[in-house]
Image (cartoon, rainbow, N blue to C red):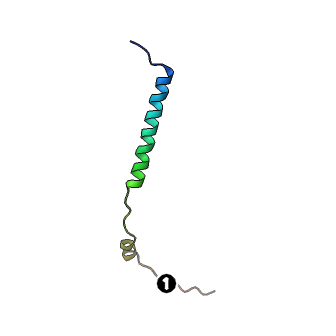
Amino acid sequence: MPQMAPLLWLNLMLMFLISFILFFIMNYFIYIPSKMESYKKLMNFQNKFWKW
């Protein structure tokens, strides 16, 4: 059974690293955040008047 040359291992490692990094980058940019308007309705703001 032939052994892999060190350059082939390096190419294999670079291919996996690049695909791993691209996977995380795509997951980061695909995420669609929900609108903040829905959170404003849920939050109950109380005005506080500070006496200095």
- Residue 4 in the image: state x and y as whole percent: 45, 19
Q: Is residue 52 above or below residue 7?
A: below
Q: Nearer the viewer, residue 42 or 26?
A: 26
Instruction: Residue lying at the far right in this picture: please name it.
Output: 52
**Picture residue at 40% right of the left edge, 49% below the top:** 26
Instruction: Residue lying at the far top in this picture: please name it.
Output: 1
Q: Which residue is mark 1?
A: 47
Secondary structure at badge 1 equals: loop
**Picture residue at 37% right of the left edge, 69% below the top:** 35
Can you tell which quarter of the image residue 33 is in? Answer: bottom left
Q: Is residue 31 above or below residue 48?
A: above
Q: Is residue 32 left or right of residue 18?
A: left
Quarter placement of the N terminus = top left
Can you tell which quarter of the image residue 19 is in? Answer: top left
Q: Is residue 33 above or below residue 39?
A: above
Q: Nearer the viewer, residue 51 or 38?
A: 38
How packed mark 1 is, by other alpha carbons closer than 10 Å (few <14, some 14-19, many 20 or more), is few
- Residue 38 in the image: state x and y as whole percent: 35, 72
Q: Is residue 36 above or below residue 46?
A: above
- Residue 51 in the image: state x and y as whole percent: 60, 87
Q: Is residue 41 left or right of residue 17?
A: left
Quarter placement of the C terminus = bottom right
Q: Amino acid at mark 1?
A: Asn
- Residue 50 in the image: state x and y as whole percent: 58, 85
User: So how many labels did they put on this image?
Assistant: 1
